[in-house]
Image (spheres, grey):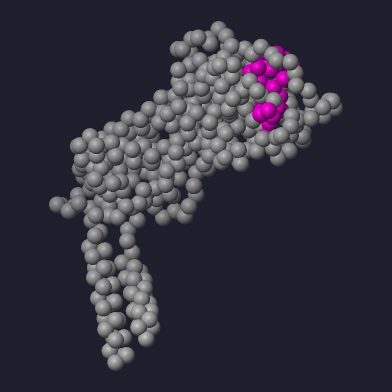
Amino acid sequence: MEKEKFFRCGLCLILCFILVSSAFPLPSRAMDDVWIANAAKELRETMVARDGEINFTYESDSWIFSPEAFGNEPAAQAILQQEVNALLDRIYSQAIAHTGVGYEGDYLRWHLKTCEESFSYGYVKVGSEMKDFVYTFKFTLTYYTTKAQEDAVTAKVQSVRSQLNLAGKTDYEKIKAIYDYLCSNVTYDNANLENDSYDLKYSAYAALVNGTSVCQGYSNLCYRLALEEGIDCRFIFGQSQGGNHSWNIVKLGGVYYNVDATWDAETKNDSYFLKTDAHMTDHTKGAEYTQSAFTAAYPMATSDYAIPGNTPPVTPPPVTPPPQEDPQPTTTPTIPATQPETQPETQPETEPATQPSTEVTTEPATQPSTEPAATNPSTLPTEITGFSQPTTVTPQNPTTKPKDPGTPEEKSPDKTWILAIGGLALLGAAVGAAALLSKKRR
């Protein structure tokens, strides 16, 4: 009988908890995924247009970030900075995610020179009452090319595609034609290899319009042309011969192969065309390209591609590669771009610039829109007070992709009365149910 009584009391407690929870839903402290996806989309469009900055605002009826992080104490500010950086990295990683569009994804990442992020927060007051908390986020961007130069690239890309006449061709024939075009029409920019003031050498514009670039320019152009023809392609950053270097992987027959037009443009013998990782012993991929998420999304072939009409491929004798470029290290939190050659800021040759990519090529999340889309700060309420804290973030090394942290969720301090009422109601219901059951049993 005691066990039956205990079971009934427990059941009553559960029913009371469900009733209280439905009557007093607790507010979510998480930054809405839809808002983040919208912000990433607007950031991507800003980068495509080569605009220099973009602002986002987010309004909430409670603090989004840890309440204890707000204040002037160094330790508290450090906590806040960390949480904000995680959010901004999440927006950035979605903005540069691989979308399959030639002028987005890796193309944006490796044409972005710097990306600085800042943040401020405050609240809206109605009389003496604090109404809403307002967060403002800002991205300040610089690029290797201008919008006019990108327009020239777009026009030239269409001209090249028309020239190559690839309509109706097989995927192999398209890849081969693009690769031959790169090797025949682009030369390595030895003249500007050590010229740190000449950033254009890292761009597809330099390769396509000027006909000379370092490895990052080759890789950016290969990415753009392949995707324009419907061939999936990724920009790969890593090391070769002791220096930073970049090349590509392309999809053929359901798997991916390495192609390095920079080196084959020098040797003229297709030694690095449609090769497996095992063949590329003098190329070492960056860490982000060896992670399980990336390798699962882009499975590499286990043997070199059998060129139609050729005898089975044999490993060619070692070749002497051109001088290493050095993709530059980027100075941005997750900023794309820096070049490979020998530049400081991430380039392919010395380290292409960024992304994280994230490479999980985290395609921007698309979720039901319940929250306001990213809005321009100009639409902010006029009466906002609070602490303005610029948090300048320098882009992280392009080889390290921004983490995609989950959105922080915390209980809202200004909603604790809901918890109190719920707790009291639950306790009262439980006591009443227990008493009723006990009385009935008697």
Q: Relative to 85, does residue 165 appear above or below in the rendering?
A: above
Q: Relative to 18, does residue 363 appear above or below in the rendering?
A: above
Percent of width and height locating residue 224: 61, 29
Q: Judge from the rendering whether residue 69 lies leftward or rightward of residue 99; answer left or right.
A: left
* Nearer-the-camera pick, 328 or 317: 317
Q: Relative to 109, does residue 6 appear above or below in the rendering?
A: below
Give residue 222's quadrant in the image: top right
Determine the residue located farthest toward the front in the rendered image.
Answer: 2
Percent of width and height locating residue 164: 73, 25
Q: Relative to 295, does residue 164 appear above or below in the rendering?
A: above
Give residue 323's quadrant in the image: top right
Residue found at x 24% / y 39%? 76
Residue 178 visible in rendering? no
Q: Report if residue 113 lies within the magenta region.
A: no
Q: Which residues are magenta?
A: 256-278
Q: Judge from the rendering whether residue 369 lies leftward or rightward of residue 361; answer left or right.
A: left
Give residue 178's quadrant in the image: top right
Q: Quadrant of the C terminus?
A: bottom left
